[in-house]
Image: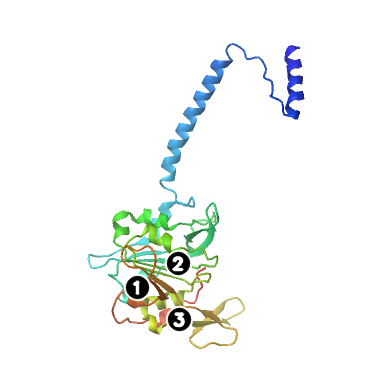
Amino acid sequence: MRESQQSNQCRELLPVGGKPCRLPIANNFGWKLFLFLLGGLLTVAVQKSLGTELSANRGDFAADLSILKNFCSGPQNEKESNYFLDMWAGRQLAQIARLNGLTNNHTLFINSHGRGGLGFFGNRYGFYPHQSLRQSKAAEPVFSAQDIARMLGPEKVASIHNVVISSCDLESCFSAPEIKKWFPNAVTIIHTPRGQAGYQPMFYSALVNPSSEVQPLYETKIQRNSNTPGYHISSVPAAGAKKLNPYMAELYLPGAQKPYRTQIAGRELLEQAKPSILLSQIQRMATVSP
């Protein structure tokens, strides 16, 4: 009866903001409370330990970093210094770079999809693989610049002087300063223009052509049959053609945190050499990489 009366008092006090009354505490309740709290602390400690181990294998956006390693390749011998993170269909980036003499440029090439709107504040940018390379129908793995740096390790990161990125920046979230933060020795960062899609033909054009010769290209959709559309790439605009803009390069002095110049990206920024151009390969790279 006493317990019932105090319960009624509680219901009366709580709605009007008074101090809630408490039921009498039994003599052994304190020990039960102590054991309960102790068990909770032990559970949290175990979960924290497991969480630390799990986070070591997870990236900024919870993607499995072991997946990232599967897309990465590096120098084949002591005369090479480039790294390739190729998450695009066909995975031909390293082959095309080597065929065009890009072997010892201390460059990280990233060929992937990309999108913004990530992170707690929705202002982060991430890289993710082409849909043909996804291992399952589960959510696509998205990786940050920090994830890529963690995957490569400090020694390889320190050797990288140029970072070349193919992915789109439709949400205007790509951040060259973030790339610079995790690759501090980079003096050239090449990427798609802010707020625009990235296109494979323009990406490869920046790798094999000097910037003085890089011009916009125009993509025209053609219908090969009832189900499969094709694309024609030309330097001359046609009716209804989509304009593909050149990639941009932000140039830094060693140790600087802000670029001293921004310009159209070209091969001479990676290597002072006359490029060999594979036009037939470039024209086949007509797929957008958003």
Identify the residue under disc 2: 88
Secondary structure, mark 2, is loop
Residue at point 56% right, 18% down? 32
How packed is label 3: few (under 14 Cα within 10 Å), some, or many (20 or more)? many
Q: Disc 1 or 2, which lies upstream in sequence?
A: 2
Q: Amino acid at mark 2?
A: Trp
Asked whether disc 3 touches disc 1, contact meaning CB atoms under 8 Å apart, the reply is no
Q: Amino acid at mark 3?
A: Gln
Task: Estimate the x, y position of residue 60 in percent, counting from the top left.
Answer: 46, 51
Identify the residue under disc 1: 97
Q: Can residue 114 be seen in the rendering of this structure?
A: yes
Per the model, the C-alpha gap separating discs 3 and 1 is 16 Å
- Give left or right: position of 252 versus 192: left
Secondary structure, mark 3, is helix
How packed is label 2: few (under 14 Cα within 10 Å), some, or many (20 or more)? many
Task: Estimate the x, y position of residue 45 in percent, counting from the top left.
Answer: 45, 32
The circle drawn on residue 283 is: 3
Q: Disc 3 or 1, which lies upstream in sequence?
A: 1
* Residue 290 vertical placement versus 264 (above, below): above
